Amino acid sequence: MLRIVVAKPGLDGHDRGAKVVARALRDAGHEVIYTGLHQTPEQIVETAIQEDADAVGLSVLSGAHMTLFRKLIDLLAERDASDIVVFGGGIVPEEDVAPLEEMGVAKIFTPGATTTEITGWVAEHFSEQDA
């Protein structure tokens, strides 16, 4: 069982997708900590460290994904917590996926991704890490 923080950074007030993903991850047997709306990257990193999370999933619909993911990854590095896997999704243009992966985001799910894809990726990614 993994411990996964699901977070909604910034001013975006739409969290239905994040809640659906959190529920799907719970149903897949993981422990999920949902931070709620309007979290700062600092709050998300603090929660991830306090909860001893294996991963952080960000839901970003605001268009600020490049800034928010970079800040989260930088803060995790500053706190010596770069082993926490960062993934996410939301309204992320296809051309931003590769730069996000280059900065250290493990996976971006673009609009239309199914909960089965997400839970499958989590299971596969972490089984590969344990191998």
Image (spheres, rainbow, N blue to C red):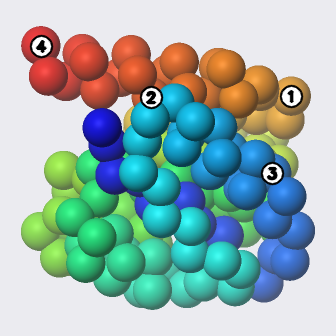
Q: Position of residue 49 (x, y in %)?
A: 25, 73
Q: Mark 4 vs mark 1: which is more N-terminal?
A: 1
Give how far apart the Cα atoms at labels 3 and 4 are: 31 Å
Residue visible at 24% across and 15% down?
128
Q: CA distance from mark 2 to mark 3?
A: 17 Å
Q: The residue under label 3 is which amino acid type?
A: Gly
Nearest the viewer among 37 and 29 is: 29
For residue 122, the mark is 2
Q: Which residue is mark 4?
A: 131
Secondary structure found at label 4: loop
Dot 4 crowding, Cα within 10 Å, few <14, some 14–19, many 20+: few
Q: Are marks 2 and 3 in contact (CB under 8 Å)?
A: no
- Residue 89 lies in quadrant: top right
Q: Amino acid at mark 4?
A: Ala
Residue indicated by mark 3:
17
Indicate which label's residue lies in the foreground, 2 or 1: 2
- Three-letter amino acid code of the residue under disc 2: Val
Q: Which residue is at 42% across, 41% downward? A: 30
The answer to which image quadrant residue 60 occupies is bottom right
| Distance (Cα) linking label 3 and label 1 | 11 Å
Point out the tag, 2 or 4, that comes first from the N-terminus: 2
Q: How far apart in space, not on screen, are marks 2 and 1 (Cα)?
A: 17 Å
Residue under numbered circle 1: 112
N-terminal of the two: label 3 or label 4? 3
Tag 1 or tag 2, which sits nearer the N-term?
1
Q: Give the class, few, some or many, for how many residues have Cα within 10 Å of label 2's Cα (few <14, many ≥20).
A: many
Drawn side of residue 52 relative to residue 34, left or right: left
In x, y percent, where is residue 112?
86, 28
- 3D distance between C-alphas at marks 2 and 4: 14 Å
- The residue depicted at 78 percent of the width and 84 percent of the height is 11
**Residue 7, placed above or below residue 41:** above
